[in-house]
Amino acid sequence: MKKIKTPVVSEEIKKLKAGDIVNISGIILTARDQAHQRIIEKGAPCDLNGGVIFHAGPIIKENNDSSSSNSKFNMVAIGPTTSTRMNPYASDVIKMGTKIIIGKGGMDGSVSYALKKEGAVYLAAVGGCAALYVDSIEKINNVHWLDLGIPEAIWELKVDDFGPLIVAMDSHGNSLFK
Protein backbone atom coordinates (compact mmCIF):
# COMPACT_ATOMS: atom_id res chain seq x y z
CA MET A 1 0.00 0.00 0.00
CA LYS A 2 1.41 3.37 -1.11
CA LYS A 3 0.43 6.46 0.85
CA ILE A 4 0.27 9.74 -1.06
CA LYS A 5 -0.11 13.22 0.40
CA THR A 6 -1.40 16.22 -1.52
CA PRO A 7 -0.26 18.35 -3.19
CA VAL A 8 1.38 15.54 -5.14
CA VAL A 9 4.93 15.89 -6.47
CA SER A 10 6.13 14.34 -9.72
CA GLU A 11 8.73 12.15 -7.99
CA GLU A 12 5.96 10.32 -6.10
CA ILE A 13 3.96 9.81 -9.29
CA LYS A 14 6.93 8.35 -11.17
CA LYS A 15 7.32 5.66 -8.47
CA LEU A 16 3.76 4.42 -9.01
CA LYS A 17 3.23 1.45 -11.31
CA ALA A 18 0.05 -0.01 -12.78
CA GLY A 19 -1.39 -2.40 -10.20
CA ASP A 20 -0.14 -0.55 -7.10
CA ILE A 21 -2.66 0.11 -4.33
CA VAL A 22 -2.82 3.72 -3.12
CA ASN A 23 -4.42 5.71 -0.31
CA ILE A 24 -4.48 9.51 -0.41
CA SER A 25 -4.42 12.06 2.41
CA GLY A 26 -4.85 15.81 1.96
CA ILE A 27 -7.12 17.69 -0.43
CA ILE A 28 -9.03 16.13 -3.32
CA LEU A 29 -11.57 17.75 -5.63
CA THR A 30 -14.65 16.21 -7.19
CA ALA A 31 -15.46 17.13 -10.78
CA ARG A 32 -17.74 15.71 -13.45
CA ASP A 33 -18.62 16.69 -17.03
CA GLN A 34 -19.96 20.20 -16.51
CA ALA A 35 -17.23 21.17 -14.05
CA HIS A 36 -14.53 19.94 -16.44
CA GLN A 37 -16.06 21.91 -19.29
CA ARG A 38 -16.18 25.06 -17.16
CA ILE A 39 -12.58 24.56 -15.99
CA ILE A 40 -11.51 24.52 -19.66
CA GLU A 41 -13.65 27.52 -20.59
CA LYS A 42 -13.13 29.76 -17.53
CA GLY A 43 -10.19 28.34 -15.60
CA ALA A 44 -10.21 26.40 -12.36
CA PRO A 45 -11.74 27.97 -9.24
CA CYS A 46 -8.86 26.55 -7.17
CA ASP A 47 -5.24 25.51 -7.67
CA LEU A 48 -4.90 22.29 -9.68
CA ASN A 49 -1.10 22.15 -9.46
CA GLY A 50 -0.22 18.83 -7.83
CA GLY A 51 -3.92 18.23 -7.39
CA VAL A 52 -6.25 15.26 -7.33
CA ILE A 53 -9.57 15.18 -9.18
CA PHE A 54 -12.12 12.50 -8.32
CA HIS A 55 -14.73 11.81 -11.00
CA ALA A 56 -17.65 11.63 -8.59
CA GLY A 57 -21.06 13.09 -7.96
CA PRO A 58 -21.39 12.93 -4.18
CA ILE A 59 -24.63 12.60 -2.29
CA ILE A 60 -24.81 15.67 -0.06
CA LYS A 61 -27.28 16.62 2.63
CA GLU A 62 -27.62 20.21 3.77
CA ASN A 63 -26.79 20.50 7.45
CA ASN A 64 -29.59 22.36 9.24
CA ASP A 65 -28.01 21.96 12.68
CA SER A 66 -24.92 24.17 12.54
CA SER A 67 -23.82 23.02 16.01
CA SER A 68 -23.27 19.44 14.78
CA SER A 69 -20.73 20.25 12.07
CA ASN A 70 -18.32 22.91 10.95
CA SER A 71 -19.79 22.69 7.46
CA LYS A 72 -23.09 23.70 5.92
CA PHE A 73 -23.10 20.33 4.15
CA ASN A 74 -22.75 16.68 5.15
CA MET A 75 -21.50 14.13 2.68
CA VAL A 76 -23.62 10.97 2.77
CA ALA A 77 -21.81 8.95 0.11
CA ILE A 78 -19.22 9.41 -2.62
CA GLY A 79 -18.55 6.87 -5.31
CA PRO A 80 -16.81 7.05 -8.66
CA THR A 81 -18.58 7.92 -11.86
CA THR A 82 -17.59 6.66 -15.31
CA SER A 83 -14.46 8.52 -16.39
CA THR A 84 -14.82 8.10 -20.14
CA ARG A 85 -17.31 10.97 -20.13
CA MET A 86 -14.42 13.27 -19.16
CA ASN A 87 -12.15 12.14 -22.05
CA PRO A 88 -12.70 15.37 -24.05
CA TYR A 89 -11.47 17.51 -21.14
CA ALA A 90 -9.00 15.38 -19.20
CA SER A 91 -5.83 16.09 -21.20
CA ASP A 92 -6.28 19.85 -20.76
CA VAL A 93 -7.02 19.47 -17.05
CA ILE A 94 -3.89 17.34 -16.65
CA LYS A 95 -1.85 20.04 -18.44
CA MET A 96 -3.14 22.51 -15.82
CA GLY A 97 -1.17 20.59 -13.17
CA THR A 98 -3.50 17.81 -12.03
CA LYS A 99 -1.35 14.82 -11.02
CA ILE A 100 -3.99 12.25 -10.10
CA ILE A 101 -7.37 11.49 -11.63
CA ILE A 102 -9.62 9.03 -9.82
CA GLY A 103 -12.62 7.36 -11.42
CA LYS A 104 -13.93 4.12 -12.83
CA GLY A 105 -13.80 2.45 -16.20
CA GLY A 106 -10.57 3.91 -17.54
CA MET A 107 -9.89 6.63 -20.08
CA ASP A 108 -8.82 6.76 -23.73
CA GLY A 109 -5.44 6.88 -25.45
CA SER A 110 -5.26 10.69 -25.53
CA VAL A 111 -5.51 10.74 -21.74
CA SER A 112 -2.92 7.96 -21.46
CA TYR A 113 -0.59 10.09 -23.58
CA ALA A 114 -1.21 13.17 -21.38
CA LEU A 115 -0.59 11.14 -18.20
CA LYS A 116 2.76 10.01 -19.58
CA LYS A 117 3.76 13.43 -20.95
CA GLU A 118 2.76 15.36 -17.82
CA GLY A 119 3.78 12.76 -15.21
CA ALA A 120 0.31 11.96 -13.87
CA VAL A 121 -1.72 8.82 -13.08
CA TYR A 122 -5.26 7.49 -13.30
CA LEU A 123 -6.46 5.61 -10.21
CA ALA A 124 -9.44 3.29 -10.31
CA ALA A 125 -11.90 3.56 -7.46
CA VAL A 126 -14.07 0.56 -6.72
CA GLY A 127 -17.71 1.05 -7.69
CA GLY A 128 -20.12 0.20 -4.89
CA CYS A 129 -17.82 1.55 -2.17
CA ALA A 130 -19.44 4.98 -1.80
CA ALA A 131 -20.23 4.44 1.88
CA LEU A 132 -16.68 3.21 2.55
CA TYR A 133 -15.01 6.14 0.77
CA VAL A 134 -17.09 8.70 2.64
CA ASP A 135 -15.56 7.47 5.93
CA SER A 136 -12.19 8.84 4.76
CA ILE A 137 -13.54 12.38 4.38
CA GLU A 138 -12.65 14.53 7.36
CA LYS A 139 -14.18 17.77 6.16
CA ILE A 140 -15.77 19.59 3.24
CA ASN A 141 -13.44 22.58 2.88
CA ASN A 142 -15.34 24.35 0.15
CA VAL A 143 -17.76 24.00 -2.74
CA HIS A 144 -17.30 25.74 -6.09
CA TRP A 145 -19.87 26.27 -8.81
CA LEU A 146 -22.87 25.06 -6.83
CA ASP A 147 -24.98 26.63 -9.61
CA LEU A 148 -24.16 23.47 -11.62
CA GLY A 149 -26.04 21.40 -9.03
CA ILE A 150 -24.76 19.27 -6.15
CA PRO A 151 -23.42 16.33 -8.23
CA GLU A 152 -21.72 18.60 -10.80
CA ALA A 153 -20.25 21.17 -8.40
CA ILE A 154 -16.59 20.95 -7.42
CA TRP A 155 -16.35 19.77 -3.83
CA GLU A 156 -13.04 20.44 -2.10
CA LEU A 157 -12.54 17.64 0.43
CA LYS A 158 -10.00 17.07 3.18
CA VAL A 159 -9.37 13.33 3.29
CA ASP A 160 -7.34 10.90 5.36
CA ASP A 161 -6.34 7.54 3.87
CA PHE A 162 -8.85 7.86 1.03
CA GLY A 163 -8.92 4.52 -0.72
CA PRO A 164 -8.11 1.85 -1.51
CA LEU A 165 -7.44 2.96 -5.08
CA ILE A 166 -5.66 1.01 -7.82
CA VAL A 167 -3.12 2.57 -10.19
CA ALA A 168 -4.87 1.65 -13.44
CA MET A 169 -2.91 3.93 -15.82
CA ASP A 170 0.57 5.00 -14.76
CA SER A 171 2.91 7.78 -15.93
CA HIS A 172 5.01 5.26 -17.88
CA GLY A 173 2.26 4.38 -20.37
CA ASN A 174 1.17 1.15 -18.65
CA SER A 175 -2.54 0.43 -18.33
CA LEU A 176 -4.50 -2.33 -16.62
CA PHE A 177 -7.18 -1.74 -19.26
CA LYS A 178 -4.91 -2.86 -22.15
Image: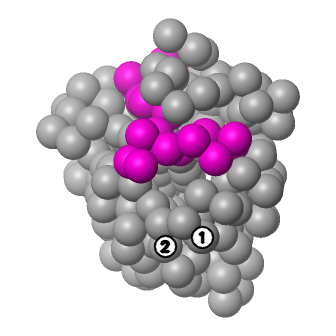
22 and 63: which is toward the camera: 22
Looking at this view, name the residue that lies furthest to the left.
Answer: 128
Question: Disc number at residue 118?
Answer: none
Residue 14 can be seen in this image: yes
What residue sits 38% from the left and 48% below the top? Answer: 177
Residue at which label 2 appears? 87
Would residue 108 be found to the left or right of residue 105 on screen? right
Kind of residue sitting beneath label 2? Asn
Residue at which label 1 appears? 110
Q: Which type of secondary structure does the marked residue at label 1 adopt? A: helix
The region drawn magenta spans: 159-178
Residue 28 can be seen in this image: no
113 and 78: which is toward the camera: 113
| Label whose residue precedes the other's in the sequence (2 or 1) | 2
The stretch drawn in magenta includes residue 176:
yes
Q: Which type of secondary structure does the marked residue at label 2 adopt? A: helix
Which colouring convention does the figure follow?
one colour
Q: Are marks 2 and 1 in contact (CB under 8 Å)?
A: yes
Would residue 5 be found to the left or right of residue 34 on screen? right
CA gap, disc 2 and disc 1: 8 Å
Question: Residue 77: x percent and y percent?
Answer: 23, 42
The local crowd at label 1, few if under 14, some if 14 to 19, many if 20 or more residues have their Cα within 10 Å, is few
Question: Residue 68: x percent and y percent?
Answer: 32, 30
Looking at this view, name the residue that lies furthest to the bottom.
Answer: 41
Up the image or down, 150 lies above or below 118; here it is: below
125 and 159: which is toward the camera: 125
The local crowd at label 2, few if under 14, some if 14 to 19, many if 20 or more residues have their Cα within 10 Å, is some
